[in-house]
């Protein structure tokens, strides 16, 4: 597909698709937030120091450069296999690249390391929503909301799920 076709397709996105992209996966603490502006981290290295693969993965994810995000998150998990944040980032990047079997593997590893936290359930629920598996998306997002009822991202993902379910009827 040429670039001209791509821009026409992008202009034709429905509000639901845009809402789904804005409600994308997130992390806690040193969070990736696809809807937030890029702010410098409090623990950013000096300008002459190289950034970690985890930090580069987050930057590329925020900039919607999912292929580069996947590369850096993959390097981060290869060098630090017990880092749940890197595994969750890798899973989210795979989701955006529509590589769902690889995302499932990364989510399984993240779950082993961090458990079924609201953050994990929200991200995996969003993954299921992207795939069109509304039943499993509902299970994970409902469990995430039960554990963290004030979380706006979880609520937004549930609203997107409900809108998608209504469209199917």
Image (spheres, rainbow, N blue to C red):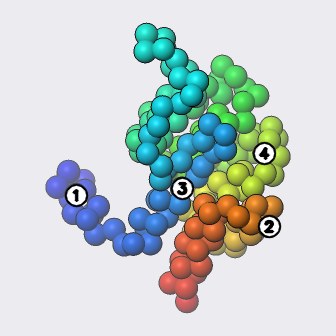
Name the mark on residue 111: 4
Mark 1 and mark 4: span between their CA atoms?
37 Å
Mark 3 and mark 2: span between their CA atoms?
19 Å
Observer-nearest of 92 and 151: 151
Q: Which residue is mark 3?
A: 24
Q: Earlier in the sequence, mark 4 or mark 3?
A: 3
Res 145 quadrant in image:
bottom right
Q: Which residue is mark 1?
A: 7
Q: Please say whether residue 62 is visible from this viewpoint.
A: yes
Which of the two discs, 1 and 2, sits closer to the camera? 2
Q: Earlier in the sequence, mark 1 or mark 4?
A: 1
The correct choice, above or below, for 54 with respect to 142 in the image is: above
Dot 4: within a 10 Å radius of its alpha carbon, few (fewer than 14), some, or many (20 or more) residues? some
Q: Earlier in the sequence, mark 1 or mark 3?
A: 1
Mark 4 and mark 2: span between their CA atoms?
18 Å
Taking the spot 55% from the left edge, 89% from the top edge, the residue there is: 169
Mark 1 and mark 2: span between their CA atoms?
40 Å
Dot 1: within a 10 Å radius of its alpha carbon, few (fewer than 14), some, or many (20 or more) residues? few
Taking the spot 80% from the left edge, 61% from the top edge, the residue there is: 147
* Outermost residue, front side: 42
Q: Is residue 7 left or right of residue 102?
A: left
Q: Which residue is mark 2?
A: 146
Residue 25's spot in the image, x, y percent? 58, 52
* Outermost residue, top side: 48
Residue 157's spot in the image, x, y percent? 59, 66
């Amino acid at each position: 597909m040429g670039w001209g076709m791509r821009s026409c397709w992008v202009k034709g996105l429905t509000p639901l698709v845009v809402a789904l992209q804005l409600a994308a996966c997130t992390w806690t603490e040193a969070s990736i937030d696809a809807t937030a502006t890029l702010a410098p981290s409090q623990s950013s290295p000096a300008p002459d120091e190289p950034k970690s693969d985890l930090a580069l993965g987050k930057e590329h994810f925020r900039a919607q450069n999912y292929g580069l995000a996947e590369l850096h998150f993959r390097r981060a998990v290869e060098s630090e296999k017990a880092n749940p944040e890197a595994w969750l980032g890798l899973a989210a990047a795979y989701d955006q690249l529509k590589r769902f079997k690889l995302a499932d593997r990364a989510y399984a590893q993240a779950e082993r390391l961090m458990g079924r936290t609201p953050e994990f359930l929200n991200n995996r629920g969003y993954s299921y929503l992207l795939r069109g598996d509304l039943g499993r998306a509902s299970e994970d997002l409902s469990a995430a909301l039960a554990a963290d009822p004030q979380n706006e991202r979880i609520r937004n993902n549930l609203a997107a799920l409900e809108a998608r379910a209504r469209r199917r009827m």
